[in-house]
Amino acid sequence: MALLRAPGEGCFVWHEISTRVNRAANDDAQLMLPITAEEMAAEAPKPAKRASQRKPVVAAPDDDGQGSLF
């Protein structure tokens, strides 16, 4: 228990960083640099596109319900 103690005041500093850190392909020192509000807005995820409505599949009269790839 003697080793478990809180860090001293001012030992840690935090700042916002790029969301690029979430991808293993990104491996450079710039990932640790603070990010500006403009950069954060540019990295914001784009709204997802709505999926188009699919027409229901109508089974042929001789279809046994198993489906076919051919």
Image: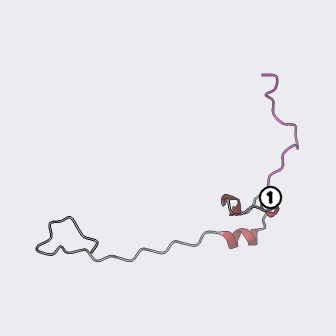
Of residues 45 and 57, the one drawn nearer to the viewer in this rendering: 57
Measured as percent of width and height from the top left, residue 63 is found at 15, 70
Q: What residue type is labelled 1?
A: Met
Please identify the residue farthest to the front as the structure is shown: 70
Q: In which quarter of the image is residue 4?
A: top right
Main SS type for the magenta part?
A: loop
Q: Mark 1 points at which residue?
A: 32
Q: Quadrant of residue 18?
A: bottom right
Measured as percent of width and height from the top left, residue 57 is found at 24, 74
Residue at screen point 80% across, 52% down: 14
Of residues 48 and 63, the one drawn nearer to the viewer in this rendering: 63
Please identify the residue farthest to the top as the structure is shown: 1
Helix, strand or loop at mark 1: helix
Callout 1 environment at 10 Å: few (<14), some (14 to 19), or many (20+)? few
Measured as percent of width and height from the top left, residue 59 is found at 18, 73
Of residues 32 and 42, the one drawn nearer to the viewer in this rendering: 32
- In the image, is residue 12 part of the stretch drawn in magenta? yes
Measured as percent of width and height from the top left, residue 1 is found at 77, 22
Residue at screen point 71% across, 59% down: 21
Relative vertical location of residue 70 with respect to residue 8 in this rendering, above or below: below
Lateral position of residue 21 relative to residue 11, left or right:
left
Relative vertical location of residue 25 with respect to residue 51 in this rendering, above or below: above
Q: What colour scheme was applied to this rendering of the protein?
A: secondary structure
**Which range of residues does the magenta coloring cover?**
1-15
Lateral position of residue 53 relative to residue 13, left or right:
left
- In the image, is residue 26 part of the stretch drawn in magenta? no
Of residues 37 and 2, the one drawn nearer to the viewer in this rendering: 2
Instruction: Please identify the quadrant where the C terminus is shown.
Output: bottom left
